[in-house]
Amino acid sequence: MTDEAPPEGSPIAAERDAVTALAPDYVVRLREWLSIPSIGTDPAHHPDVGRSAEWLAEALRADGWPTVEVWDGGPALPAVYAHWPAAEPDAPTVLVYGHHDVQPVDPIELWRHPPFEPTLVGDELFARGASDDKGQVAMHLLGLRAHLAATGRMSPAVSVKLLVEGEEESGSPHILELIRAHRDRLACDLVVVTDTAVFNRDAITVVTGQRGLVEAEVTFTSGTMDLHSGRFGGAVPNPAVELAKLVAALHDDDGRVAVPGFYDDVRLPSDVERADFAGLPFDEAAWLAGPGAGVTEATGEAGWSSLERTWVRPTAEVNGLVAGYTGPGVKTIIPHRASAKLSFRLVPDQRPEKIRDLVRAFVDAHTPSAVRAEVRFGGASEPYAAPTDHPATLAVRDALRAAFEQEVRFTRAGGSGPASALHTGLGVATVYFGVGLPDDRIHAPNERVVVPFLLRGAEALAYLWRALPDRMRARRGSDAT
Amino acid sequence: MTDEAPPEGSPIAAERDAVTALAPDYVVRLREWLSIPSIGTDPAHHPDVGRSAEWLAEALRADGWPTVEVWDGGPALPAVYAHWPAAEPDAPTVLVYGHHDVQPVDPIELWRHPPFEPTLVGDELFARGASDDKGQVAMHLLGLRAHLAATGRMSPAVSVKLLVEGEEESGSPHILELIRAHRDRLACDLVVVTDTAVFNRDAITVVTGQRGLVEAEVTFTSGTMDLHSGRFGGAVPNPAVELAKLVAALHDDDGRVAVPGFYDDVRLPSDVERADFAGLPFDEAAWLAGPGAGVTEATGEAGWSSLERTWVRPTAEVNGLVAGYTGPGVKTIIPHRASAKLSFRLVPDQRPEKIRDLVRAFVDAHTPSAVRAEVRFGGASEPYAAPTDHPATLAVRDALRAAFEQEVRFTRAGGSGPASALHTGLGVATVYFGVGLPDDRIHAPNERVVVPFLLRGAEALAYLWRALPDRMRARRGSDAT
């Protein structure tokens, strides 16, 4: 199945030609959308998030989507919902997830073009959100129109629903509320998450999972004020020293997380995934060095490659440390308080609630009697792994192979996202379709999208919508046996 | 010797009466001096440091000191020098050290009276500098006049020189330059440092040493920018984690500093000192709890008491730690840099230069290959221990015993000061004479001096100047044998 050609009789050239014909209009419209600074993490830009939602709704209506709604009544920033049903009553329903909020633009002085004045340089379109995620949402609009144009249909072969939220860059805090409030509208047979990247231009890949996240802040306190290190030094507890001991105990000598029970529920990646990872053209030195990172040596859990360490192995990291005097020069004090911000990346089937309990117990075990410990947990998200043998996963892979004309492998993503919430909240298989590039500089100055690359993505989507009814039907057939 | 009464034939009452008679005028003058905000650490107050020096010079002239100079030509803030020679050509020369700069007053809102509007409440005089160190310098002026009045002499029995510097609260950065520039004027047989406290009101003590200090800042760096903890977490070095390991390795399980060679040159306190320390009425719980410290449990090097840990044992402390994101909420980064401010308190005969070398080697040994380490050393000062069997030490003890009418023990001070620089720079024995109280709240809001206590100190000085020629002569005699 995975090696077969695109569905027989498909005039592949028709999809490509349709994308090519429609593309100029979409690039013009995307530039308009990208000029709206929908920075969801900045309350000053919340009106822009609303304008961005309205812009998208208008674009969808102009494209002919029968149902288009802006959801802005609840606590969430405005989200856009749209539905273009298939004519066939037994056609599967696919919910596409994306987002229209964008990252902040600091440091602004490093941008070569103003981040909200989209600028085409050769085939690259520079703007905040060009790749993450407005460009990829626009790719879906184009992909659907190309599907219709190439097949001559008046409605798509699958019922396509769109959910484009406005809070992804804030950690999607209301995604489960959105799902609960609009359960009927969002009902579907499959979720397609479009907010990820391929491995690189020459190694097109399908993401099959993201890591979860548990955030914690540990604070050690002794007494109520900093003490003079001359008068008291040597005889009273130093919370900074004690906290350093706790942090030092987080990993064993093999780089494994030393929180007891941490690995109990870890599911190993499948053989096909490990083989795919090993087959990727991974240049570790280049990955460590750039862009701008300048790291010179990989480290981590013994027995796993760098890709495996970031994709399928859980971690404990220190995101921040602070104690005592941190300004210029010297202040000879013994701090009375020290804090560490910790984050734990989780993989299937670790559960945030259980990891929180283990972390709390670990902190208790590493708190000397002379200091008081406080653990505050921040946000959490579940890890998620898509089924690698699901017909939708394989259909995505085949569609990408047809469009990009190359072998397509599985990868994972090390970060966290709403896929697990969508999967849990909607109760259906959730797969990834994303064609960002690792050098798109998302979350960084000079974000861009490579326009021809985005068009190939739209072409792949056109193949996907055409092929999916048969692929899903085969699944339902096999489910029924 | 140590148990003998004050020198025979001394009409003790004469010194006490003289202090009582002269005191009101000195309290009035001290209040005037304390109204000058000579905060040496704040450049905005440097003119006030100059005014404070001029005020002191004028007061000394009014008191009859034959030589009075303000030294303000060099890089140091203005210092005051004065000399009142003895008539006897073979009288010993004593250089008294004090300072007229004061600590900042933050947090100002906690003061019950404005810090530079000296306020008498009962027998307490509240003002910044009342105890540290203007009050104790004024005590010297009064003590000398009482000595003259009580003995009927026109000049003191010892040649008294005064050096009152303006940079002690800044760490006396130019003290060695001052000594070098004025070596002839400062030549003496003995230095008396007046800038310390007794154990408490009911346990009068003589300080016999202060700890030295080495300041260091260790920075670990990996790459050039913070990395996303999802994308890179688990596969790249985390300088915060590595630095925590270094800090955790600073002490062994017995609370000893684990820097190899650190204890090589440590001189143990004398038996008489350890016996004196053990005999002090030390309430450990109260010491830990107050004022405002709220520490609940002593910790430190095994085998030593809290007083010994702070007085005669060296330490390694963390004064500050910082890495990554330390603001509110969460930022899921791997910091590219982490820094720790460390300070090492030294005891005789540890040398700052050697300790720096050992610390550098320790950091090298604890720097994993994946991170770069930088060690920057800040200020340093030598530890100092006064000879406990020196006739001047014993004379100070006897003078205090006569004035305060109680047994007097030896203590040390855990902090650092210029005693070692004075001892080294001038090449003579250096002893401490200070009658601050531990609850004078020096360096804190509501600093005060207990006036009757200060007067007892002046009385003790009057005894000291009278007794010192014979005591020193005995020493010179014994040195000659």
Image: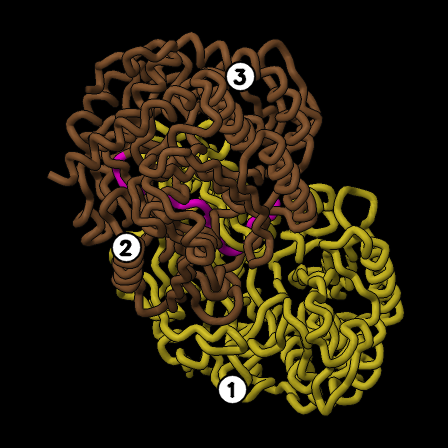
Chain colours: A brown, B yellow
Kindly report which numbered mark, 2 or 1, lies closer to the viewer in this rendering: 2
Left or right: A254 as drawn, with respect to B90: left
Q: Secondary structure at mark 2?
A: helix
How crowded pointer 1 is (Cα within 10 Å; few <14, some 14-19, many 20+) is rated as few
Span of residues in magenta: A312-328
Q: Are marks 3 and 1 on the same chain?
A: no
Q: Is residue A277 magenta?
A: no
Label 1, on which residue?
A: B202
Residue B459 x/y as whole percent: 67, 82
Q: Report how far apart the C-alphas of labels 3 and 2 lie in the structure.
A: 40 Å
Q: Is residue A319 magenta?
A: yes
Q: Quadrant of residue B361?
A: top left
Task: Please give the chain letter of the residue carrying mark 2.
Answer: A
Label 3, on which residue?
A: A450
Left or right: B359 as drawn, with respect to A154: left
Give A74 or B180, whichever is nearer the viewer.
Answer: A74
Label 2, on which residue?
A: A355
Q: Residue furthest left?
A: A481
Task: Tell me which residue sits at (60%, 59%) in the image.
Answer: B190
Compared to residue B296, the image places residue A57 above or below, namely above
Q: Report how far apart the C-alphas of labels 2 and 1 lie in the structure.
A: 56 Å
Amino acid type of the residue that numbered disc 2 sits on in the rendered structure: Ile
How crowded pointer 3 is (Cα within 10 Å; few <14, some 14-19, many 20+) is rated as many
Q: Is residue B364 visible?
A: no
Q: Secondary structure at mark 3?
A: strand
